[in-house]
Image (tube, helix red, strand yellow):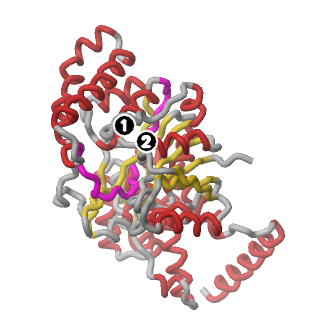
Amino acid sequence: MCPMVTIIVPVYNAEKTLRRCIDSVLDQEFSDFELLLVNDGSKDSSGSICQEYAQKDSRIRLLDKPNTGVSDSRNQAISLARGTYLQFLDSDDWITPNATKLFVEAAEKYHCDMVISDFYRVSGERVSPKGDIDEDCVLTLEEFASHMIENPADFYYGVLWNKLYRRDIIEKHQLRMNNEISWCEDFMFNLEYMRYCNVFFALKVPVYYYVKTKGSLASQGGNISKAIKMKLMVFDYYNNFYKHVFTEEDYEKNQLQVYRFLLDAASDGAVPPSILPGTKKLGEERSRAITATLSGEGIQNEQYRSRKLLDYYLEPLAQKNNLTLEEIRLMFDLAQPHCSTTLKELADFTQMTPRHLSGLLQKLTRKALLKAESHRGGRQLSLSFLPAGEMLLEELAQVQSNYEKACFDGFTEEELVQYGCLSDKIKQNILKRL
């Protein structure tokens, strides 16, 4: 049976980072994938590391080949791939545990030809989120192209690794990387691929860690004349792409914007130092659980485990809606059945102080998610979701579904029934005491 996703990782002399990369794939919440490791004639221990992992996990397939470059490695992997979708990683980078799951969910739900996501830029011990499209949204080819024209040389559009592709489109049109160039070959592939796409989805969640170690075109040893020729070749692809996408009239209106590519490409997609807004110490960009507490016993440890699992599913929703984890937690609590009619009662239900809860409610009101009203001299509180908040309810319900699936993974139907009966007994015993 063919897997849903083929994940492709070209490998060349990556012994220092390869285990981190492979482990991030094997730790995916989504498991219906094959991992193609392409050892491109590595001279270090990368080949033996690949063999070690391939022997441990049947989802891993290894291709050993002479050193012919990253583009040829990807091309050979594409020819061997069996998945419905293709996902790419570089061997010195890694992905979040929910990366493939979020890609596939979006692709299946919206029948996408391409899913594109935000990513993290890692520079030393600092990390900052990077994206270009400001909200989760479905886009047509024309709409996607209109976003891209604003930042034509941005990594967000140019690279392979923050995207999910449909393999049938690639095979139908025999799309492959250009082995003759060593700069922007990813972007040229993307431009060709996008010509055959109708539906795009922008995922406003960073799912990929890009480590800034790659050199620019100017630092790769090529002469200036060769660099200029490469950039002109890529621009020719880029220019033809917009001639294909836009009507003649629209192309004329946007021609100056199209030609901006030549100017923007001069930066080679350089990643600035870690002084950008949102920059954090690596490891602090997402909430982390305390391992010892997770495995501990007792009521507090059990509550901690449940909270951290819920946070795991709530945090991506917070990121793509520009909310804090605390704000999305409150939205989740408010979406649950409760009988709180005063601020004090709601504070008790959400385990906050009334003052802190009041501040959070004001923030959610300013963000047009909630409407909060006081009655009877402030003694009564009524809350209602505004249209933007209503739109979150479906996703909050999916969070609860994901949480429950994770908790009851591997349970038989009989075990679920037994659990339900035992939970109800526990509930009745607690009600007797309270």
**In the figure, residue 318 lies in which quadrant?**
bottom left
Q: Which circle marks residue 328 in the picture?
A: none
Residue at 38% of width from left, 16% of height from top?
244
| Label 2 packing within 10 angstroms: few (<14), some (14-19), many (20+) | some
Specify whether residue 384 is painted magenta. no
How far across and down, in percent of the image, does residue 332 sit?
48, 61
Question: In the drawing, does residue 407 fall left or right of residue 39?
Answer: right
**What SS does tag 1 mark?**
helix
| Disc on the earlier residue, 2 or 1 | 2
Looking at numbered disc 1 in the image, what kind of residue is underneath it? Glu
Q: Which residue is mark 1?
A: 185
The span from disc 2 to disc 1 (Cα, nearest Å) is 8 Å
Q: Which residue is mark 2?
A: 71
Residue reaching furthest to the top = 249
How far across and down, in percent of the image, does residue 31 sit?
62, 58
Q: Nearer the viewer, residue 285 or 176?
A: 176
Residue at 50% of width from left, 74% of height from top?
307
**What SS does tag 2 mark?**
helix
Question: In the drawing, does residue 326 fall left or right of residue 409?
Answer: left
Q: Nearer the viewer, residue 347 or 273?
A: 273
Q: Nearer the viewer, residue 285 or 349?
A: 285
Question: In the drawing, does residue 294 fall left or right of residue 280?
Answer: right
Looking at numbered disc 2 in the image, what kind of residue is underneath it? Ser
Q: Which residues are magenta?
A: 196-217
